[in-house]
Structures are given as structure tokens and as C-alpha cells.
Image: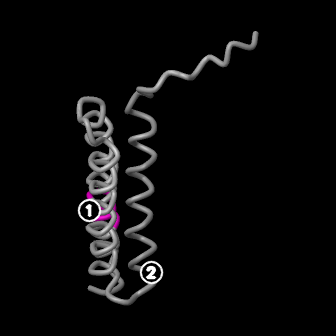
Amino acid sequence: MENSVLHYMFLIFAGLLLGTFFYGGLLLTIKKCIAVKLSSLLFLISMLVRTLIVVGGFYFLSSGNIYNLLFCFSGFFIARLLFRIFIPVMVKPINSGAQ
């Protein structure tokens, strides 16, 4: 099953799940940071946990094969694009006052 299409589809799907976990966690962290007093600590802990889980997932899924890693990362990148397209921008641009 090492070179089958089903195997690579599984890796892309796993990358999608990792990307959804990472960027979904980022979205939840940003929403929670508004109401929390120590928002920088919450953001730092969330970033460390999300990064460790995703890097561990990439390491586990790659099995030492660069092609497995590339397919998994392509799923992660697709998740990034989907979040970028379907999640509206929550931050309004800062008006510098210069007109």
C-alpha cells in the first residue's frame, strides 16, 4: 500500500485534519483572547500546543518518506486555503488618519 493512490489520498485527508486542527485552534484562540486578561499567555500556550501536535502528526504520518510528508503538507496547505477563503476577516484595518 506504500505507493497506492488510496494511501496518498489518506495522507492528504490527514493533512486536511491537521490543518483544520491548527487553524481552527488559532481561530478559537483569537476569539478567546478578546475576553481573557492574560491573552498573551493564552496565545503562547495555544501556539506551542498546536505546533507540537501538528509537527508530531507530520512526523508520524511521514514515516521517514519525503513523498508522504509532501502529500500530508499539501492537505495542510489546502486547509489553510479553505480557512482563508471561508472565514471572514475579523480585524478591521487601522485608520492612520492620513487622507
Q: In terms of secondary structure, where does tag 1 sit?
A: helix
Image point (46%, 26%), residue name:
91
Split into 4 quadrants, where in the image is the N terminus? Answer: bottom left
Image spot of residue 19 (x, y percent): 34, 56
Q: How is the image coloured?
A: one colour
Q: Is residue 96 left or right of residue 6?
A: right
**Which secondary structure, mark 2?**
helix
The type of residue carrying mark 2 is: Tyr
Query: Which residue is pictured at 29% across the width and 61% down the height?
Result: 13
Predominant secondary structure, magenta span: helix
Q: Tell me, yes or no, whether the two marked residues, 1 and 2, touch with CB atoms within 8 Å.
A: no
Residue 1 lies, with reference to residue 58, above or below; the image says: below
Q: Which mark is residue 69?
A: none
Q: Against 26, is 3 above or below?
A: below
Task: Please give the residue where the numbered disc 1 appears in the rendered image.
Answer: 49
Q: Nearer the viewer, mark 1 or mark 2?
A: 1
Q: Which residue is mark 2?
A: 67
Which comes sooner in the sequence, label 1 or label 2?
1
Q: Residue furthest right?
A: 99
Q: Residue at x 39, y 41 (%)?
A: 83
In this picture, which residue range is highlighted in magenta? 12-17
Name the spot of residue 7 as percent of width and height, x first.
29, 76
Left or right: 67 as drawn, with respect to 23: right
Nearer to us in this view, 67 or 99 = 99
* 15 in the magenta segment: yes
Give the residue type that dot 1 points to: Val
Identity of the residue drawn at 31% across and 62% down: 48
Q: Nearer the viewer, residue 25 or 34?
A: 34
The stretch drawn in magenta includes residue 91: no
Residue 65, above or below 34: below
Give the percent coordinates (x, y) of residue 24. 28, 45
